[in-house]
Amino acid sequence: MIFAPALPPPPDAEAAESYSPQLPSRLIARIEPTWLRRQRYAYKRSVLPIEGGRVLLRLTEPPMIEVDPASKECEVIGWGIRMSRDFIHELPKKMARRFLDLFSKADSSRLNEEERQCWMGILDQVDFPAFCIDRAAPHYLEGRLARLDPVCLVDWHDGERQQIGREAARSLGCLRPGDEFGAYVKLGKQNSVLSIERITLLAPVEE
């Protein structure tokens, strides 16, 4: 019996067997290796100390930190801070310094456009009124101690009678009701008295 010779595979079939799908080089260049991708982390800290902790900058939302594994640098998003991740322990100091720098420039109208945008973004992340209260200097006030116990009441020189909290009232412990005094008073929100210091007796009550 005579067999017909095997026919060669059609050109299309041979091409299909030798074909292996490949991404165009143009697309391959856009694929970033996992180990090179930037990672973002929330900075889990709510308070930044300023002036040795006498003034506190309270964060109302955690800043985001982006880490570049290639350069080993960290960037605080929106704060304009870049630093080596080897010195990440210095981040609170750098953030406090950056805030004070922009605050000082804003107070004297020296912000450029880039700094102004950065400053506005930072204000959205901090409790600015609380910072201003902590930073404010005490005011000199004069008044008369109306009562010390069980609650402390002071009649200030403008005629307003105010109840003084227990902590601040301790400074008046050596006074007697009726004593007129002057003192440096640190005020908080809604003019609440936070502290009373450097008391001077103006018109003490006679014994």
Image (cartoon, rainbow, N blue to C red):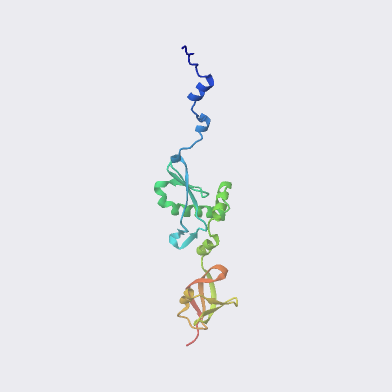
Q: Which residue is drawn at 50% across and 75% down?
A: 165
- Residue 7 in percent (x, y) is at 50, 16
Q: Residue at x 47, y 41 (%)?
A: 37
Q: Say how many tags the image has.
A: 0
- Residue 76 in percent (x, y) is at 49, 49
Q: In this view, does 113 lie to the left or right of 73?
A: right
Q: Which residue lies furthest to the right in this view?
A: 159
110 over 8 or under it: above or below: below
Q: Residue furthest top?
A: 2
Q: Residue at x 42, y 52 (%)?
A: 90
187 over 32 or under it: above or below: below
- Residue 71 in percent (x, y) is at 43, 41
Q: Which residue lies furthest to the left in this view?
A: 86
Q: Residue at x 47, y 62 (%)?
A: 55
93 over 185 or under it: above or below: above
- Residue 36 in percent (x, y) is at 45, 40
Q: Is residue 171 left or right of residue 111?
A: left
**Who is closer to the viewer here, 182 or 33?**
33
Q: Which residue lies furthest to the bottom in this view?
A: 207
